[in-house]
Image (cartoon, helix red, strand yellow):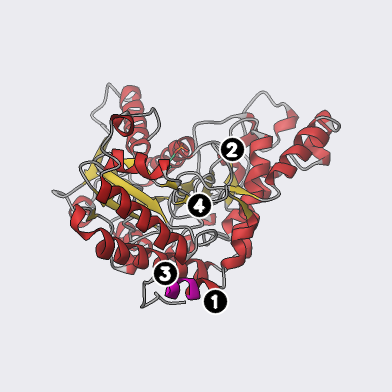
């Protein structure tokens, strides 16, 4: 599959007719007539998930009650789903658990990496991330750093968060003081993608450990954590993995750290023998060390429905179609909406982008509201960014054509220019 060279609607329809991933559209339940360009924020409902939810609630909970922890595999679910998810991110069995939220998992991964460095290179006290990272990633890094500093207030051992930005490149920032480098593989706003292999190698060369946030990468682009020799990774399941609103996140740790890593949320689910009810903590000797407490089983069961769809898809085909959809989208916006001042903020080079495309426009918020009103769902991110997720499993080339035609109409008629579309909702 390569990028269609003709971008008229008939040619794109012909492209859809030979699309090897076309049948995956039927694996999702999407409203008729809607063009959903927000699967990077909340994936759609996989077919069968509602039935699975009813089964978990009515039978496993309703009938099985407490027995279901054993008889329905509830207790094993974080590891069993972790092994499934591992296949999508270049992990091995036993390296991933599905649990908690991305924010919480990032806290655990950062604490774990910092602790390893405290033992091996205690003078390294910088957590390096980037100003353009998703806010929670920066906030959690600040939280860990503040906490370590409050505990060590009497000493000079101050931790700090350092931010890569237009004034400080990754190369400049990666000096001998960096304990951990924590980056998002694909940038949530611009769609820009780091070269995981090269960045991980550079960080290791500089003596730092590396944590990758795969929130906008897992299920969207091929990821090879072991190939890159990364240290830790975290990510969401409700975005490209279609696990449902607020579904539990995941955390991966390279097997080489498993015997020695520690994390501070030492709840009983991370204990070597939770039901021994011991009065002291002994960590599990594997990735279950990253668990904390009792998991949201109904929500976790939904994660599996989404994972099973992604596991059936050939990731190389997914990537090829994602790039082609994005190329067509960019070309059509240029061609059809060129005079309306949309500025592309996503890198055009294939190797440097993930699976969403963003444009900047001063009236971005109102334009997105007008699109949603016409059943084309994208989203808006500050500042002025219109964001469009291009998800190969349920989008066609003609969807892209139709979405751009509606966008063109909205821009041409200034349909966005009404007070109703300027009112900010709590979630943008
Ligand atoms: C979506 C996203 C998150 C979300 O974290 P939650 O704890 O699930 O709210 C975190 N990091 C990145 C990079 C994201 O894109």
The secondary element bearing badge 3 is classed as: helix
Q: Are marks 2 and 4 in contact (CB under 8 Å)?
A: no
Question: In the image, 302: left or right of 101?
Answer: right
The secondary element bearing badge 1 is classed as: loop
Farthest residue to the front: give it: 413
Magenta region, mostly helix, strand or loop? helix
Q: Earlier in the sequence, mark 1 or mark 2?
A: 1
Instruction: Please give the residue where the numbered disc 2 appears in the rendered image.
Output: 291
Q: How far, Cα to Cα, is label 1 from label 4? A: 23 Å
Q: Earlier in the sequence, mark 2 or mark 4?
A: 4
Q: Is residue 122 above or below residue 143?
A: below
| Viewer-nearest of discs 2 and 4 | 4
Q: How far, Cα to Cα, is label 3 from label 1? A: 15 Å
Instruction: Please give the residue where the numbered disc 1 appears in the rendered image.
Output: 18
On residue 240, which mark appears? 4
Q: Residues within 10 Å of mark 3 (few under 14, many from 20)?
A: some
| Viewer-nearest of discs 1 and 2 | 1
Answer whether residue 11 is magenta in the image: yes
The secondary element bearing badge 2 is classed as: loop
Q: Earlier in the sequence, mark 2 or mark 3?
A: 3
Q: Which of 202/6 is in front?
A: 6
Instruction: Please give the residue where the numbered disc 3 appears in the rendered image.
Output: 9
Q: Which residues are magenta?
A: 10-14
Q: Position of residue 253 (x, y in %)?
A: 51, 51
Q: Position of residue 33 (x, y in %)?
A: 53, 51
> Which quadrant is home to the C terminus?
top left
Q: How far, Cα to Cα, is label 2 from label 3? A: 50 Å
């Amino acid at each position: 599959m390569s990028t269609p060279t003709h971008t008229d609607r008939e040619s794109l329809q012909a492209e859809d007719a030979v699309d090897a991933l076309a049948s995956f559209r039927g694996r999702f339940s999407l409203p008729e007539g809607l063009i959903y360009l927000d699967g990077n924020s909340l994936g759609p409902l996989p077919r069968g998930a509602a039935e699975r939810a009813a089964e978990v609630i009515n039978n496993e909970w309703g009938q099985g009650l407490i027995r279901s922890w054993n008889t329905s595999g509830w207790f094993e679910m974080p590891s069993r789903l972790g092994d499934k998810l591992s296949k999508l991110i270049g992990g091995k069995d036993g390296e991933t658990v599905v649990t908690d939220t991305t924010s919480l998992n990032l806290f655990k991964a950062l604490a774990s990496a910092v602790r390893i460095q405290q033992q091996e290179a205690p003078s390294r006290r910088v957590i390096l991330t980037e100003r353009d990272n998703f806010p929670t990633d920066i906030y959690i890094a600040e939280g860990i750093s503040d906490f370590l500093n409050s505990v060590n207030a009497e000493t000079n051992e101050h931790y700090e968060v350092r931010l890569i930005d237009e004034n400080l490149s990754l190369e400049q920032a990666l000096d001998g003081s960096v304990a951990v480098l924590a980056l998002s593989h694909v940038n949530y706003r611009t769609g820009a993608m780091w070269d995981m292999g090269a960045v991980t190698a550079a960080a290791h060369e500089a003596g730092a450990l590396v944590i990758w946030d795969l929130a906008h990468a897992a299920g969207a682009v091929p990821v090879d954590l072991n190939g890159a020799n990364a240290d830790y990774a975290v990510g969401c399941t409700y975005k490209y993995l279609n696990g449902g609103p607020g579904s539990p996140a995941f955390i991966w740790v390279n097997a080489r750290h498993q015997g020695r890593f520690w994390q501070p949320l030492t709840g009983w689910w991370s204990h070597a023998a939770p039901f021994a009810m011991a009065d002291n903590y002994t960590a599990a000797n594997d990735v279950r060390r990253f668990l904390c407490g009792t998991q949201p089983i109904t929500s976790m069961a939904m994660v599996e429905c989404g994972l099973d769809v992604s596991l059936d898809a050939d990731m190389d085909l997914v990537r090829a179609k994602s790039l082609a959809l994005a190329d067509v989208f960019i070309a059509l916006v240029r061609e059809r909406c060129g005079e309306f001042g949309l500025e592309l903020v996503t890198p055009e080079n294939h190797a440097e982008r993930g699976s969403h495309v963003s444009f900047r426009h001063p009236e971005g918020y109102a334009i997105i509201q007008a699109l949603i009103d016409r059943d084309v769902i994208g989203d808006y991110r500050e500042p002025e960014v219109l964001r469009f997720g291009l998800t190969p499993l349920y989008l066609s080339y003609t969807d892209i054509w139709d979405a751009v035609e509606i966008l063109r109409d909205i821009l041409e008629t200034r349909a966005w220019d009404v007070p109703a579309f300027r009112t900010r909702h709590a979630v943008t």
